[in-house]
Image (cartoon, rainbow, N blue to C red):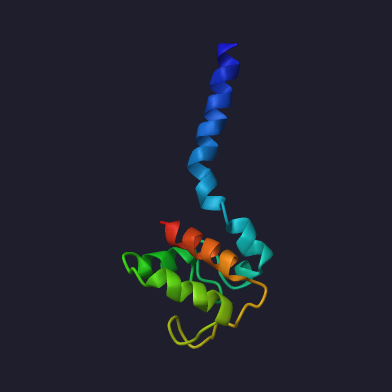
Amino acid sequence: MNRTILAVMTVAATFAVTGPAFADEALAKAKNCMACHAVDKKVVGPSYKDVAKKYAGDAKAAAMLEAKVIKGGAGVWGPVPMPANAQVNAAESKKLVAWVMSLK
């Protein structure tokens, strides 16, 4: 009985630690964000960890990034522009940006 409880607690603790890191990766995949970005390496666009690092401590960054997810942008990370993403609504953009900014 004690082993079962310990096993369940271990699994729950593992999920609690790793869960937030993957909380919105599924949304990023569903919205095709992962076609150009990865969590920890540059693909076409910057890694999400690099984005989080660049904008850490910037109070205005979240709103700017939320708009950029929907409208696209250019010139910040190199010559390749980020296209607009009509598949993403404002609530999803906010959720994606919060996830990206939580990465370390």
Q: Quadrant of residue 77?
A: bottom left
Residue most toward the front?
A: 91
Residue drawn 31% across the image and 65% down it: 57
Residue 45 is at least partly visible in this image: no
Residue most toward the top?
A: 1
Residue drawn 66% across the image and 69% down it: 32
x%, y% of residue 61?
A: 39, 71
x%, y% of residue 72?
A: 55, 82
Q: Quadrant of residue 60?
A: bottom left
Residue drawn 56% across the image and 69% down it: 37
In depth, the one of 73 and 77 nearer the eye is: 73
Residue 85 lies, with reference to residue 23, above or below; the image says below
Residue 75 lies, with reference to residue 59, above or below; the image says below
x%, y% of residue 59?
A: 34, 68
Number of disc labels: 0
x%, y% of residue 15?
A: 55, 39
Residue 42 lies, with reference to residue 2, above or below; the image says below
Residue 88 is at least partly visible in this image: yes
Q: Which quarter of the rendering shows the C terminus? A: bottom left
Residue 54 lies, with reference to residue 3, above or below; the image says below
Q: Which quarter of the rendering shows the N terminus? A: top right
Residue drawn 53% across the image and 28% down it: 10
